[in-house]
Image (cartoon, grey):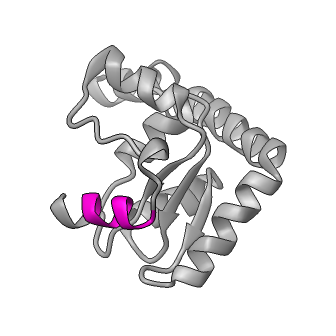
Amino acid sequence: MQETKKLVKKLKIEENVKFIGFLSGDKKNDALYDSDLVVQLSRLEQGAWAPIEAVLCETPILVTRNTGSGEDIKRLDAGALVNFDDLEEFKRTVEEIFNNYDYWKKKTLNAKNYIIKNLSFNARINEYINLYK
């Protein structure tokens, strides 16, 4: 955290960066909804919980490919993917998202609708009922 704060100061972007700490419940959902882009970069991230929550809040996402999270997002066609530690690809991808924001917003909404229609508990309840029968 200290290194990140130093970098933000060095880059003179303090007015654009907020360190908000842990959020849960409605506060987390409000933050995801109010964001323009949610980024989850990791070498080994196993699941796309935060990015999927962002999609459900209708916020475009960017995650690391070749991780569990990246595989989930790729399978759902829910957002953008980049290689870990490839700063140029990251920069190009962020620029692509903001230069074509309507496209990425539509992709996000399509993924949200797919998740609700096919993966939500309500959509899959009959599978559980049949399993218990």
The reply to whether the magenta stretch includes residue 8 is yes
Q: Residue at left 44%, top 77%?
A: 66
From which residue to which does the magenta span run? 4-11
Please determine whether, in this image, residue 27 is positioned above or below residue 49: above
| Image coords of residue 24 (percent x, y) | 25, 25
Q: Which image quadrant: the N terminus?
A: bottom left
Characterize the magenta stretch by its predominant secondary structure: helix
Quadrant hosting residue 20:
top left
Quadrant hosting residue 4:
bottom left
- Closest to the observer, 131 or 54: 54
Number of dots carrying numbers: 0
| Image coords of residue 92 (percent x, y) | 68, 73
Q: Residue at left 36%, top 20%?
A: 129
Please determine whether, in this image, residue 11 is positioned above or below residue 89: above
Q: Residue at left 49%, top 37%?
A: 54
Quadrant hosting residue 11:
bottom left
Furthest-left residue in this view:
2
Please determine whether, in this image, residue 128 is positioned above or below residue 51: above
Q: Is residue 2 left or right of residue 108?
A: left
- Closest to the observer, 129 or 113: 113
Q: Is residue 50 left or right of residue 2?
A: right
Q: Is residue 130 left or right of residue 72?
A: left
